[in-house]
Amino acid sequence: MTISVALCTYNGEKFLRKQLDSILDQTVSVNEIVVCDDGSTDATLKILNEYEKSYPHIFKIHNNEKNLRSVKNFEKAISLCQNDIIFLSDQDDVWVKEKVEKYTSFFRENPKTNAICSNGFGIDQKDVILDVVTVWDIIAEQKKRNPKLSYFETINFAGNFVTGASMAIRKDFVSKCTPFPEIDGFHHDEWIALIAGYTDSLEFFPDKLFFYRQHDDQQVGGVFFENTENKKRRLSKFFTVDDHQNKSFGNYKHLLKRLSASYKKNKQLIETSVFYRDLLGKNLEKIEVLFYIYKNRMKNKYPVRFFFLNIIDKIKNKRQLKK
């Protein structure tokens, strides 16, 4: 089983060396590290070139002609990876030595698993472990209480707990989740997690297998909370998917009317995505069930719901015309 790392960089000179060293210092070696730099103006490229000279058989560095931003930059890096398993990597974290070994072992023993994520430590700019509770800690607790926990429903009802910095996917799964949608506030890790979760091929490790850095310049955060019993109880309740949430659809016609315009904007993605082609092949009732899950996230303003709203709208309109 061969291993790639898809690493995206942008002005990451401050912490980049520690991340690269932790990847190279794994108990199971990686075969390639594909780096896509998004127009860094600091010493990031200089650092990368140093590593490429030291490890020419591992590093493959690509300089983007224009700034792609995080989502599309990761799409590019992932698409350039050649090996069986692709690990996603941020530029400012640190991996536990056994991370690659544990992930690849699980992939090997569980051929139906397409994506894996894990729990992790929180660290600050000086590598000090933070005294915090994380969303991953809560999911680990929930999984212990309920081994059949649905990751797909949890992501939809409660929010995304899958952090790209902890994720690895199979190479042959890439075509099922690309292209990544470009929507404000919606990231590639949640997109991949939704598709893997929907197909029951997402796995979460409760083990802490990486150090997630909190610092002033990070693009995405919001996974750390104060380590108190009260906060743990509140988070645990928030990330619990209750049975009653699956029992009724409610009235959503006004939502369809308000959001119908978004279909035209995302038409190409819907028509080219393997995920949505598969969904459209299912019966309408199944799609409505999935829509109900998205409808319950309206308060969180997660825009991926637009796709299902408009798919259902289109199908319903066709049925009415046939009548």
Image (cartoon, rainbow, N blue to C red):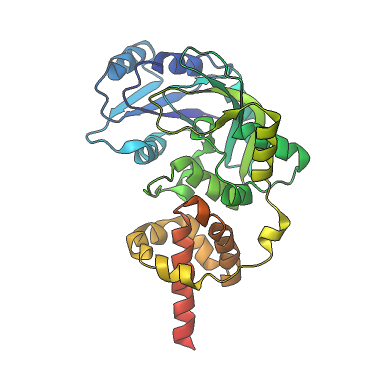
Would residue 321 appear left or right of 284 to someone viewing this image? Answer: left
Determine whether, in the image, residue 157 is placed left or right of residue 87.
right
- Residue farthest to the bottom? 323
Q: Is residue 191 above or below residue 243?
A: above
Going by the image, does 284 lie left or right of 141?
left
Residue plotted at (27% across, 25% down): 40
Work out which residue is located at the far front of the displayed protein and give it.
Answer: 230
Q: Position of residue 35 (x, y in %)?
A: 36, 27
Evaluate whether residue 298 shows in this view: yes
Q: Quadrant of residue 303?
A: bottom left
* Place of residue 188 in the rendered image (x, y in percent of width and height, measured from the top left): 44, 42
- Image coords of residue 238 (percent x, y): 64, 44
What's the residue at 49%, 19% (across, down)? 23
For the residue pair 100 and 289, the one nearer the viewer reads as: 289
- Against 176, is 67 above or below? above
Residue appearing at x 26%, y 32% in the figure: 64
Outermost residue, right side: 145
Would you say residue 200 is visible in this rendering?
A: no
Figure quadrant of the N terminus: top right
Residue 135 lies, with reference to residue 55, above or below; the image says below
Q: Is residue 216 left or right of residue 101?
A: left
